[in-house]
Amino acid sequence: MHPEVTDVALIQCTSPFLKVRYLEELLEKFEPSTDCVFSVTGSYKLRWRRDASRRGAVVPVNFNPERRPRRQDWDGELLEAGMFYVARRELLLKGRFQNDRCQVVEIEPGDALEIDTVEDLELARVMDDLRNKR
């Protein structure tokens, strides 16, 4: 890395619904006490995973089934959106892009689409067409 580089930003071209206001918020949050800023989106999905030790039975990941929350009764989770990242040089030289001094920019769920497959690209085109009709 060139010595004059102090910060590195990665803007993903696979996030077609990037808005200027998200980048403005990123810049506002990337203050001296912050090492990194990245995009997230909120989720209220109750997640499960297969447990190989229990013969593939599913177990809850982010909630207790005995006290199953209603969407209105919990804050949900933040999922990394992959739209953009910015980090300090020192952090990157440690081989990391994130640490416990990060800030996040919350992206609207409808803007958080990442194009990783042909189907994602088709969905982005449909979403863009719908947005342009408004």
Image (cartoon, rainbow, N blue to C red):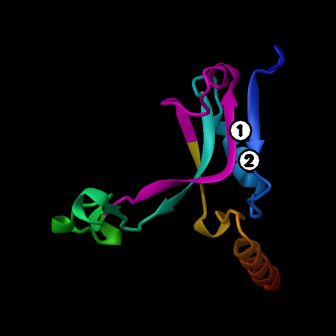
The answer to whether the residue labelled 1 contacts the one labelled 2, judged by CB atoms less than 8 Å apart, is yes
Q: Amino acid at mark 1?
A: Leu
Q: Amino acid at mark 2?
A: Leu
Which residue is at a point 71% across and 68% down the rendered structure image? 117
**Does residue 96 belong to the magenta stretch?**
yes
Q: Residue furthest left?
A: 66
Mark 1, Cα crowd under 10 Å, few <14 / some 14-19 / many 20+, is few
Vertical order, 24 against 32 (above or below): below
- Side of 88 where 99 appears, left or right: left
In this figure, which residue is indicated by the disc labeled 2?
A: 23
- Side of 26 where 61 appears, left or right: left
Residue 122 in the image: state x and y as whole percent. 76, 78
Mark 2, Cα crowd under 10 Å, few <14 / some 14-19 / many 20+, is some
Which segment is the magenta one? 74-103
In this figure, which residue is indicated by the disc labeled 1?
A: 27
Residue 63 in the image: state x and y as whole percent. 27, 60
**Does residue 48 belong to the magenta stretch?**
no
Question: SS class of the residue under badge 2?
Answer: helix
Vertical order, 25 against 29 (above or below): below
* Quarter that holds the C terminus: bottom right
Vertical order, 2 against 115 (above or below): above
